Structures are given as C-alpha cells and as structure tokens.
Image (tube, rainbow, N blue to C red):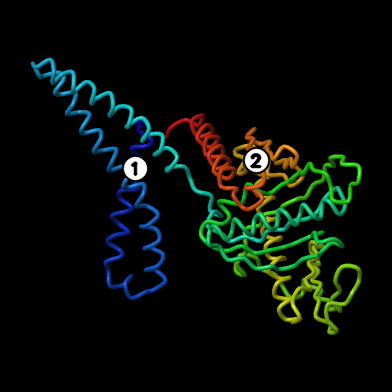
Amino acid sequence: MASSILTSMKRIYDRYDEVGLRLSSSEILSNRTLLTKYARERSDLEPKVASFRRYENLTKQLDDAHVLIREEDDPELVKLAREEAEKLEQELGELEEELKYMLLPPDPLDGKDIVMEIRAGTGGEEAALFAANLYRMYMHYADMKDWKTELLSSTPSEIGGFKEVIISISGAEVYSHLKYERGVHRVQRVPVTEASGRIHTSAASVAVLPEAEEVTVDISPNDLKIDVYRSSGPGGQSVNTTDSAVRVTHLPTGMVVTCQDEKSQHKNKAKALKVLRARLIDMALTEQHNERSAARRSMVGSGDRSAKIRTYNFPQNRVTDHRIGLTLHSLDRILEGEIEDLIDALRLEDRRRQLEAQAKQPEG
C-alpha cells in the first residue's frame, strides 16, 4: 500500500479513537449539539476504519502464507499456501482501490438539501411537456430514496406541461446524488401535436442548487423589492381573488423570483426567499468553481448549465449520457424514476477523475 494511504489511515484511526473518547465524556454527553456532531463524525469514519482493519487482517494472513511457503517442506501444503497467497493478493489489490476512493476528500456540499429548477427550453409546448416528464422522473426518484419534496413554484403550460417548475428536495445525501443532473436535457420524439409523425428535438434545462441556510447567505431587507399581485393560471384565468402572489427582486444582482402556488401571501414570500437564497449561494459557488476550475472540475463535464448532458430518445427507448458515453435502452423505466444506474456511473467517473488528478500530484 502507498505510504500516503497508510499515513491517511493512521490519521483516521487516531481521529476515530479521539472521537470515541470525547463521546464518553460527561461534557459531550450533556451537550446535545456536540453529541450529535461527534456521533455523526464517528459514524462517517466507521466504514473507513472497518476497511482498514480488514486490510490489516488480510495483510497478516498473506504474511503467514509467505512464511509457510518459505519454511514448509510438504509440497502439498506449499501448493495450498501459494494458492491462498494468490487469492489474498487479489483481495488486497481490490481493497486498496476501495480505500483510495474512501480517502478522496468529500464535497462539503454533498450532505445538503437542494432546490431544483426545471425549465422548458427550445421546442415550445413539446419542451414544456418534456419538462413535466423530468419533474415526474425526479419526484419518483425522490420517493424511492424516501426524500421529502415540496413544490415551491410552477408555471403550467396550456396542455399540461411546465414552462418552469421549482421544487425543494430534502433527505440523506440529496446533493451528492442529484448534482450531476444540472445541464440541458434533450428529448427526441414525435410530439402529440405532430400529425405527420415526424420526430422533433426539444430541450429542458435543470439547475440543482444546494439549499442555503439563512446564516449562509446574508440577505439584507434593504436589498429586496417585494411586489404582491393577483395569481393567475395558464391562459390568464384567475387562481384566486386575493393579492397573494409575490415577486421578490434582489436589487444588487437583479435576480427576480416569483411564487404564486400558495393562497397565502406569507407562504409565497417564504418560498420565494428560499429560492432566492439557493440561487445566491449557487452564484457564489459558481464563482468559486470558476476560480479553481483549472485545478479540478467538480462535476463530470464542465458543470455549465448550457452544456447538453443527456438525450432521451423515445422511438428507440434509449437514454444517452454524453459526458460518460453511457447508453441505456430503458427510457420507460428511467422516466419512472429508475435513474440510479445513471447516477452511479456518473459518481464513479467523477471519483475516477479525482483519483487521476490526485495521482498526478507529488506525495507529501
């Protein structure tokens, strides 16, 4: 095993023991916040410690097998020891690769909840219908993961699609799974409005914003212009008869967020501010990302929202992710939320690239 991995594992061992001692102290046991913090840290360290202990155990077994090969006179026992050593070397090699992945620095945003924005792009009503397909796909996936979802804002189209839909998704490791979904999603199919049967290409864009806590983004009330107006649905029909819709303008950036889904002006304002905070933190993170993009790309691909990331081809029941060249002939299941294979492949490729970049850096 490389000395850098051994050094990292020693550090993790020491930290694991240190956190264990802290968890048994009366000072920590009487402080719920610190108790939760250290219990979570120890839980996060446990898989790494367990893998390293397994590595040490396999290494000892391999050393014993080599001793037997050198010192045993019985040819049959030597043969068995060689077979055992070969098997152990293979296991150790696989485990070492696993440990390399485990030791990659985590994305500090991975545990965040998200605000997801889906917008119809080129293609008119067909693009709006596709945006609705994507919305339902992510809602089904969230259900499978036992995540909580909340509709923050939506602008329906005339025939049942969405010009725009914004949702919040909260739960375990939401951002770490869905961060690769940001970008332009393209669809190829025969629109319901197409009489000649020609295949059209439309698009929708997806933004995945790590949800900002209020302390993360400081929004001064003096920087906000808040307008209220009467909600309206598609075609201009009135949703309700009170001025409950809210438009929030962030004056320093010119960012505008509207929300009219709730009948309560207070609830619409709260949802609009939630979206605004998420957009502001995303803008700050994008600036940071651009500054360090030469060192590392955090998304598979550029992370640019204008980049086409995936094509959904209905006639061929095919989905292709262009960033990793992966094609799956299971479009029907994917649109029902079964996107785990795509996400796993993207996460694996991201880690592989991180390892590649890490290997190019000098040790020490």
Q: Earlier in the sequence, mark 1 or mark 2?
A: 1
Q: Nearer the viewer, residue 360 or 43?
A: 43
As helix, strand or loop, the secondary structure at mark 1 comes to helix
User: Is there any visible trace of residue 308 in the rendered image?
Assistant: no
**Residue that sits furthest to the bottom in the current view:** 242
Whole-percent x, y for residue 328 in the image: 63, 38
Q: Nearer the viewer, residue 46 or 251?
A: 46
Residue 102, placed above or below residue 124? above
Residue at 62% from the left image edge and 58% from the top image edge: 140
**Image quarter hosting the N terminus:** top left
> In the rendered image of this protein, does residue 158 appear above or below residue 199?
below
The amino acid on which the numbered mark 2 sits, given as a three-letter code, is Ser
Residue 293: mark in rendering: 2
**In the picture provided, is 324 more to the left or to the right than 272?**
left
Residue 101 appears in which quarter of the rendering?
top left
Where does residue 231 sit, x and y in percent of width and height?
A: 84, 76
Report the amino acid beneath label 1: Met
Q: Are marks 1 and 2 in contact (CB under 8 Å)?
A: no
Mark 2, secondary structure of its residue? loop
When the figure is inspected, residue 169 is found, relative to residue 236, above or below; the finding is above
Res. 279 in view: yes
> Residue at 33% of width from left, 76% of height from top?
30
Q: State the separation of the CA atoms marked 1 and 2.
A: 28 Å
Residue 4 lies left or right of residue 264; in this view the side is left
Which x, y percent locates residue 301? 66, 38
Residue at image position (24%, 25%) is 85
Residue beneath disc 1: 9
